[in-house]
Image (cartoon, grey):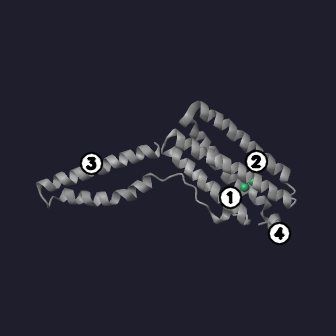
Amino acid sequence: MNSRNKSLIYAAIVGLIIVAIFLGFLSSITNPISWLLIVVLALTPVLYEKVNKTNEIQWKEEYSVGIESLDNDHKKLISLLNHFTTAYDYAMSEEFEREALNDLINYTKYHFDREEKLLEQHDYPNLVAHKAQHKQMIKQVERFMDLYNEKGHEALNEISEFLANWLINHINGTDKEYSELLSQRGAK
Ligand SMILES: [Fe+2]
Ligand SMILES: [Fe+2]
């Protein structure tokens, strides 16, 4: 069930509890059921949060590649990824979903370019292999964009999962391989 449906069910339950409390108090202000339902109502936000855990990714210090400009790019990518996941998860308008996806893809391309230039500047020995991974990812994303244009919202589940897995694995794996060398060579 997506988050939008969960929110609607939550709103309906809260509405029903409020009506039941009101009706209980109409019969008597000391109606124990109404007082019990007030307690239940107070607890619903906590229960809702537990049920509706989002797929949001949090930046962790262990993701750091030790170069401030690239860490900032990676943080921005995670934030754009979360923005896109929310747009998808809440099945927001097609325009909103497309904009969030485009923002994420455009920033990914911008970041790859910047990262590759920095690696080049500091004579990173695995540059060719690293660039190849970036290129392959962009190709896959373009295939997904075609799928999205064809299928619309239902294609987004696959896209969202791919982007989340790929970005985190790449940042936390391949990107970290350049950390030590680039830090030693004074990259910022
Ligand atoms: Fe990166
Ligand atoms: Fe990279």
Question: Which of these two is toward me, 178 or 67?
Answer: 67
Q: Which residue is mark 2?
A: 134
Seen at 57% across and 52% down, the residue is 82
Mark 1–mark 3 distance (CA, rounded to whole Å): 46 Å
Mark 3–mark 4 distance (CA, rounded to whole Å): 63 Å
Quarter of the rendered structure image containing ligand 1: bottom right
Identify the mark nearer the N-term, 2 or 4.
Answer: 2
The residue carrying pointer 3 sits among few (fewer than 14), some (14 to 19) or many (20 or more) residues within 10 Å by Cα, namely: few
Image location (x, y in percent) of residue 78: 62, 55
Question: Which of these two is toward me, 58 or 39?
Answer: 58
Q: Residue 184: which disc? A: 4
Q: Which residue is mark 1?
A: 73
Identify the mark nearer the N-term, 1 or 3.
Answer: 3
Residue 33 picture quarter: bottom left
Residue at the far top: name it.
150
* Label 2 with label 4: CB-CB less than 8 Å: no
Please state which of the two labelled residues, at mark 4 or mark 1, is closer to the viewer.
1
Residue 153 picture quarter: top right
Seen at 85% across and 54% down, the residue is 126
Position of 129 with respect to 103 (left or right) is right
Q: Secondary structure at mark 3?
A: helix
Please state which of the two labelled residues, at mark 2 or mark 1, is closer to the viewer.
1
Q: Is mark 2 within 8 Å of ligand 2?
A: yes
Please state which of the two labelled residues, at mark 3 or mark 2, is closer to the viewer.
2
Q: Residue 16: which disc? A: 3
Q: Secondary structure at mark 1?
A: helix
Mark 2–mark 4 distance (CA, rounded to whole Å): 24 Å
Q: Residue 91: which disc? A: none
Tell me the amino acid under the disc marked 2. His
* Label 3 with label 4: CB-CB less than 8 Å: no
* Label 2 with label 1: CB-CB less than 8 Å: no
Quadrant occupied by the C terminus: bottom right
